């Protein structure tokens, strides 16, 4: 890796980490607005990739819908409460796309693909990142939480949403360096020639190690949440598997489009899809897993 590219990567990380940490810390509309921008930008990149294959999705409505899905989750940070609004948004986008295809695409403009990719792009980015808001504001009953004080209770949502982010980052890092050091056998050569089985195993090992530490020190010892070491191992395995599947899914899309990176918004890192590909998978997976783990542990979840 050239020194200039390494410097760009480091600069992006040094600038991006504090911004991400601040958004997670404040939560609410701050986090929602930040993720809505990411979702809209990711959808635009996906639509750009589709155009490499001759598909012409409706970029502006799709990007707006992607951002709106996140903002709706911000206004109602519970999937059951947000579901009617989210479903209505998706249905309106589908019907509006179908109507627009009559006049703007016609028979020869691949209208079915245009509408399908428009809806899929909004769901792939906005629908998945909405779960970060559900995690950040997961309802926890402090009254039934013996180990909690108001300060620790306030940190619970931050710790929950940081969980998939940190474990995904560790998985990617261990997979990258483990693959470079020991990689021999290709994991999915037709999809991503650079990924190896040894790298995937290294990613899994690193994620499990952090998952155990996080569950023991953060969830149990600090916050008093009923997520033990065994649940920490299970969550780490889920996140590692979904992170690697998300990475492969984005690689598959890029290979079909015939491009190396989804964009260039992050110097040295590529585009939004390149940076958030795993999180589109791990954030919803972490939400579903943690809800089940907390429910199995009883209070403080309700």
Image (cartoon, rainbow, N blue to C red):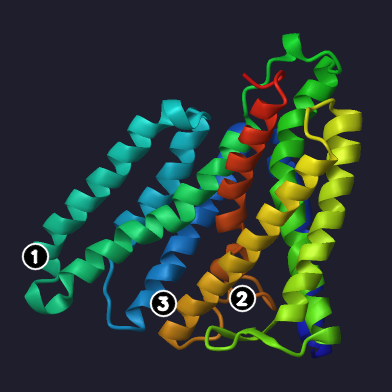
Residue 117 on image: x %, y %: 31, 65
Question: To which residue does mark 1 refer?
Answer: 103
* Quarter in which the C terminus is drawn: top right
Q: Choose top left, top right, bottom left or bottom right for residue 230.
A: top right
Tell me how far mark 3 sits from mark 1, CA to CA: 23 Å
| Mark carried by residue 270 | 2
Residue 210 on image: x %, y %: 85, 53
Tell me how far mark 2 sits from mark 1, CA to CA: 35 Å
> 67 above or below 42?
above
At a point 43% along the width and 69% down the height, the residue shown is: 46
Q: Choose top left, top right, bottom left or bottom right for residue 137.
A: top right
> 153 above or below 281?
above
Residue found farthest to the top:
143
Q: Choose top left, top right, bottom left or bottom right for residue 219.
A: top right
Camera-nearest residue between 279 and 189: 189
Residue 280 is left or right of residue 3, and the answer is: left
Q: Residues within 10 Å of mark 3 (few under 14, many from 20)?
A: many
Tell me which label, 2 or 1, sits earlier in the chain.
1
Residue 120 is left or right of residue 114, and the answer is: right
> 142 above or below 189?
above
Tell me which label, 3 or 2, sits earlier in the chain.
3
Residue 127 is left or right of residue 219, and the answer is: left
Q: Does any portion of residue 115 appear in the rendered image?
A: yes
At a point 12% along the width and 56% down the height, the residue shown is: 99
Tell me which label, 3 or 1, sits earlier in the chain.
3
Which element carries disc 1, helix, strand or loop? helix
| Mark carried by residue 90 | none
| Mark carried by residue 49 | 3
At a point 66% along the width and 22% down the height, the residue shown is: 301
């Amino acid at each position: 890796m050239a020194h200039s590219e390494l410097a760009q990567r480091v600069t992006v990380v040094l600038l991006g980490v504090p911004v991400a940490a601040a958004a997670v810390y404040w939560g609410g509309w701050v986090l929602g607005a930040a993720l809505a921008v990411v979702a809209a930008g990711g959808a635009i990149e996906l639509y750009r990739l589709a155009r490499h294959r001759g598909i012409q999705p409706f970029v502006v409505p799709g990007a707006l819908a992607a951002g709106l899905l996140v903002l709706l989750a911000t206004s109602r940070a519970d999937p059951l409460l947000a579901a009617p609004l989210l479903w209505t948004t998706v249905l309106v986008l589908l019907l509006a796309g179908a109507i627009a295809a009559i006049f703007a695409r016609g028979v020869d403009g691949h209208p079915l693909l245009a509408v399908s990719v428009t809806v899929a792009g909004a769901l792939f980015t906005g629908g998945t990142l909405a779960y970060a808001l559900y995690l950040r504001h997961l309802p926890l009953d402090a009254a039934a939480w013996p180990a909690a004080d108001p300060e620790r209770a306030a940190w619970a949502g931050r710790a929950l949403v940081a969980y998939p982010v940190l474990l995904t980052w560790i998985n990617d890092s261990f997979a990258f360096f483990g693959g470079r050091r020991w990689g021999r056998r290709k994991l999915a050569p037709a999809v991503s020639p650079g990924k190896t089985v040894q790298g995937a195993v290294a990613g899994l090992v690193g994620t499990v190690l952090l998952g155990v530490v996080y569950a023991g020190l953060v969830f149990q010892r600090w916050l008093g949440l009923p997520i033990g070491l065994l649940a920490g191992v299970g969550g780490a395995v889920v996140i590692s598997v979904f992170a690697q599947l998300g990475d492969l899914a984005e690689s598959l899309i890029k290979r079909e489009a015939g491009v190396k990176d989804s964009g260039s918004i992050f110097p040295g890192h590529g585009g939004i899809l390149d940076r958030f590909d795993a999180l589109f998978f791990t954030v919803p997976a972490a939400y579903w897993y943690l809800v089940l783990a907390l429910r199995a542990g009883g209070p403080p979840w309700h």
